[in-house]
Amino acid sequence: MPFDTNSLPLSGGIVIAALLYAGVSVLITGQVVGERTINKSNWELQCHAALKSEMIAREPAPTFIPKLDCNSILGLFGAEGKRVCRRHGNPQFNFPMLDQLNAQKRRVQALQQKRLSFAASKIGSRCGCAMSVTLEKNRIPWAIYAGSIRTITPPAIKNVQFELETALRSPLCAMKG
Protein backbone atom coordinates (compact mmCIF):
# COMPACT_ATOMS: atom_id res chain seq x y z
CA MET A 1 0.00 0.00 0.00
CA PRO A 2 1.72 3.21 -1.14
CA PHE A 3 1.88 6.28 1.08
CA ASP A 4 -0.60 8.97 -0.03
CA THR A 5 1.01 12.40 0.21
CA ASN A 6 -2.19 14.22 -0.85
CA SER A 7 -3.70 13.86 2.64
CA LEU A 8 -0.81 15.76 4.29
CA PRO A 9 -1.16 19.48 5.14
CA LEU A 10 2.04 20.11 3.20
CA SER A 11 2.70 19.07 -0.34
CA GLY A 12 4.56 15.80 -0.90
CA GLY A 13 7.50 17.62 -2.48
CA ILE A 14 8.15 19.64 0.67
CA VAL A 15 8.01 16.53 2.86
CA ILE A 16 10.37 14.65 0.57
CA ALA A 17 12.73 17.65 0.40
CA ALA A 18 12.73 17.90 4.22
CA LEU A 19 13.47 14.18 4.57
CA LEU A 20 16.23 14.46 1.98
CA TYR A 21 17.69 17.48 3.80
CA ALA A 22 17.59 15.60 7.11
CA GLY A 23 19.27 12.58 5.51
CA VAL A 24 22.05 14.69 4.02
CA SER A 25 22.54 16.38 7.39
CA VAL A 26 22.81 13.05 9.20
CA LEU A 27 25.06 11.36 6.67
CA ILE A 28 27.25 14.16 5.34
CA THR A 29 27.07 17.73 6.60
CA GLY A 30 26.81 16.86 10.30
CA GLN A 31 30.05 14.89 10.13
CA VAL A 32 31.84 17.60 8.12
CA VAL A 33 30.72 20.38 10.47
CA GLY A 34 31.65 18.19 13.45
CA GLU A 35 35.17 17.56 12.14
CA ARG A 36 35.71 21.23 11.40
CA THR A 37 34.38 22.29 14.79
CA ILE A 38 36.62 19.83 16.62
CA ASN A 39 39.66 20.79 14.53
CA LYS A 40 38.94 24.48 15.19
CA SER A 41 38.97 23.80 18.95
CA ASN A 42 42.62 22.57 18.76
CA TRP A 43 41.65 19.16 20.12
CA GLU A 44 44.68 17.43 18.55
CA LEU A 45 47.22 19.68 20.28
CA GLN A 46 45.42 19.53 23.63
CA CYS A 47 45.07 15.77 23.41
CA HIS A 48 48.73 15.22 22.49
CA ALA A 49 49.94 17.46 25.31
CA ALA A 50 47.65 15.84 27.89
CA LEU A 51 48.61 12.29 26.92
CA LYS A 52 52.34 13.09 26.88
CA SER A 53 52.25 14.68 30.32
CA GLU A 54 50.15 11.77 31.59
CA MET A 55 52.69 9.26 30.28
CA ILE A 56 55.62 11.13 31.79
CA ALA A 57 53.85 11.34 35.15
CA ARG A 58 53.18 7.59 35.11
CA GLU A 59 56.81 6.71 34.44
CA PRO A 60 58.77 5.74 37.54
CA ALA A 61 61.80 7.78 38.47
CA PRO A 62 65.11 6.36 37.24
CA THR A 63 66.67 4.03 39.75
CA PHE A 64 69.85 4.98 41.50
CA ILE A 65 72.92 3.13 40.28
CA PRO A 66 75.61 3.42 42.94
CA LYS A 67 79.17 4.22 42.01
CA LEU A 68 81.51 2.66 44.51
CA ASP A 69 84.91 4.29 44.63
CA CYS A 70 87.25 5.43 47.35
CA ASN A 71 85.64 8.86 47.77
CA SER A 72 82.11 7.47 48.05
CA ILE A 73 83.10 4.93 50.73
CA LEU A 74 85.92 6.54 52.71
CA GLY A 75 84.45 10.02 52.16
CA LEU A 76 81.90 9.07 54.82
CA PHE A 77 84.71 9.36 57.38
CA GLY A 78 85.20 13.06 56.62
CA ALA A 79 88.43 14.84 55.79
CA GLU A 80 90.59 11.96 57.02
CA GLY A 81 88.94 9.49 54.63
CA LYS A 82 89.24 11.91 51.70
CA ARG A 83 92.91 12.41 52.49
CA VAL A 84 93.51 8.64 52.25
CA CYS A 85 91.82 8.61 48.82
CA ARG A 86 93.91 11.55 47.59
CA ARG A 87 97.10 9.85 48.77
CA HIS A 88 96.30 6.44 47.21
CA GLY A 89 94.15 7.49 44.26
CA ASN A 90 90.43 6.99 43.75
CA PRO A 91 90.13 3.39 42.54
CA GLN A 92 86.81 1.78 41.64
CA PHE A 93 85.78 -1.10 43.87
CA ASN A 94 84.48 -4.02 41.88
CA PHE A 95 82.21 -6.22 43.89
CA PRO A 96 81.22 -9.45 42.11
CA MET A 97 77.45 -8.85 41.98
CA LEU A 98 77.51 -5.06 41.63
CA ASP A 99 78.32 -5.06 37.90
CA GLN A 100 75.48 -7.48 37.19
CA LEU A 101 73.07 -5.43 39.30
CA ASN A 102 74.03 -2.21 37.51
CA ALA A 103 73.70 -3.90 34.11
CA GLN A 104 70.23 -5.17 35.03
CA LYS A 105 69.15 -1.69 36.16
CA ARG A 106 70.37 -0.22 32.86
CA ARG A 107 68.41 -2.86 30.90
CA VAL A 108 65.25 -2.08 32.88
CA GLN A 109 65.68 1.65 32.25
CA ALA A 110 66.24 1.04 28.52
CA LEU A 111 63.10 -1.10 28.38
CA GLN A 112 61.08 1.60 30.14
CA GLN A 113 62.38 4.19 27.68
CA LYS A 114 61.46 1.95 24.74
CA ARG A 115 57.97 1.45 26.17
CA LEU A 116 57.57 5.21 26.61
CA SER A 117 58.62 5.95 23.03
CA PHE A 118 56.22 3.27 21.73
CA ALA A 119 53.36 4.79 23.71
CA ALA A 120 54.28 8.27 22.44
CA SER A 121 54.11 7.03 18.86
CA LYS A 122 50.50 5.89 19.43
CA ILE A 123 49.24 9.22 20.81
CA GLY A 124 48.01 10.46 17.42
CA SER A 125 45.90 7.39 16.80
CA ARG A 126 44.29 7.65 20.26
CA CYS A 127 43.39 11.30 19.67
CA GLY A 128 41.99 10.49 16.22
CA CYS A 129 40.04 7.59 17.69
CA ALA A 130 38.45 9.89 20.28
CA MET A 131 37.42 12.29 17.53
CA SER A 132 35.90 9.51 15.42
CA VAL A 133 34.04 7.98 18.36
CA THR A 134 32.64 11.38 19.35
CA LEU A 135 31.47 12.11 15.82
CA GLU A 136 29.84 8.71 15.44
CA LYS A 137 28.25 8.63 18.89
CA ASN A 138 26.76 12.10 18.41
CA ARG A 139 25.74 11.76 14.77
CA ILE A 140 22.20 13.11 15.32
CA PRO A 141 23.25 16.12 17.47
CA TRP A 142 25.85 17.03 14.83
CA ALA A 143 23.16 16.72 12.13
CA ILE A 144 20.84 19.01 14.09
CA TYR A 145 23.67 21.50 14.57
CA ALA A 146 24.59 21.46 10.88
CA GLY A 147 21.02 21.21 9.57
CA SER A 148 19.88 24.21 11.60
CA ILE A 149 22.78 26.21 10.19
CA ARG A 150 24.31 26.23 13.68
CA THR A 151 21.37 28.05 15.29
CA ILE A 152 20.46 25.06 17.47
CA THR A 153 23.29 23.71 19.59
CA PRO A 154 22.45 20.41 21.32
CA PRO A 155 24.04 19.77 24.75
CA ALA A 156 26.41 17.15 23.32
CA ILE A 157 27.82 19.81 20.99
CA LYS A 158 28.06 22.47 23.70
CA ASN A 159 30.08 20.01 25.80
CA VAL A 160 32.16 18.61 22.94
CA GLN A 161 35.39 18.82 25.02
CA PHE A 162 33.85 16.53 27.64
CA GLU A 163 32.60 14.16 24.93
CA LEU A 164 36.10 14.00 23.43
CA GLU A 165 37.74 13.34 26.81
CA THR A 166 35.19 10.62 27.57
CA ALA A 167 35.82 8.98 24.20
CA LEU A 168 39.59 9.18 24.75
CA ARG A 169 39.27 7.31 28.05
CA SER A 170 36.80 4.76 26.67
CA PRO A 171 37.85 1.15 26.02
CA LEU A 172 37.47 1.79 22.28
CA CYS A 173 40.40 4.20 22.29
CA ALA A 174 42.45 2.64 25.06
CA MET A 175 45.97 1.73 24.07
CA LYS A 176 46.76 -1.95 24.39
CA GLY A 177 50.35 -3.04 24.78
Image (cartoon, grey):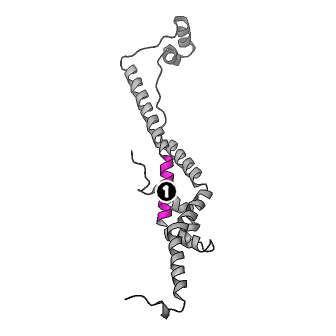
Residue located 54% across and 75% down the image: 21
Residue type at mark 1: give it: Ala
**Front residue of this view, candidates 80 and 90:** 90
Seen in the picture, residue 58 relative to 114 is either above or below; the reply is: below
**Front residue of this view, candidates 84 and 16:** 16
The quadrant in which residue 114 appears is: top left
Secondary structure predominantly adopted by residues drawn in magenta: helix
Question: Residue 5's spot in the image, x, y percent?
Answer: 48, 89
Question: Residue 175's spot in the image, x, y percent?
Answer: 42, 49
Mark 1, residues whose alpha carbon is within 10 Å: few (<14), some, or many (≥20)?
many
Seen in the picture, residue 17 relative to 11 is either above or below; the reply is: above
Q: Is residue 127 within the magenta segment?
A: yes
**Front residue of this view, candidates 123 and 149:** 149
Question: Residue 166's spot in the image, x, y percent?
Answer: 49, 60
Write down the region rendered in magenta.
122-136
The secondary structure type at the circle numbered 1 is helix
Seen in the picture, residue 153 relative to 50 is either above or below; the reply is: below
Q: Quadrant of the C terminus?
A: top left
The quadrant in which residue 100 appears is: top left
Q: State the residue lying farthest toward the top.
A: 87
Seen in the picture, residue 66 relative to 165 is either above or below; the reply is: above
Residue located 54% across and 80% down the image: 18
Q: Quadrant of the N terminus?
A: bottom left
**Front residue of this view, candidates 78 and 138:** 138
Question: Residue 6's spot in the image, x, y percent?
Answer: 49, 92
Q: State the residue lying farthest toward the bottom.
A: 7
Q: Which residue is mark 1?
A: 130
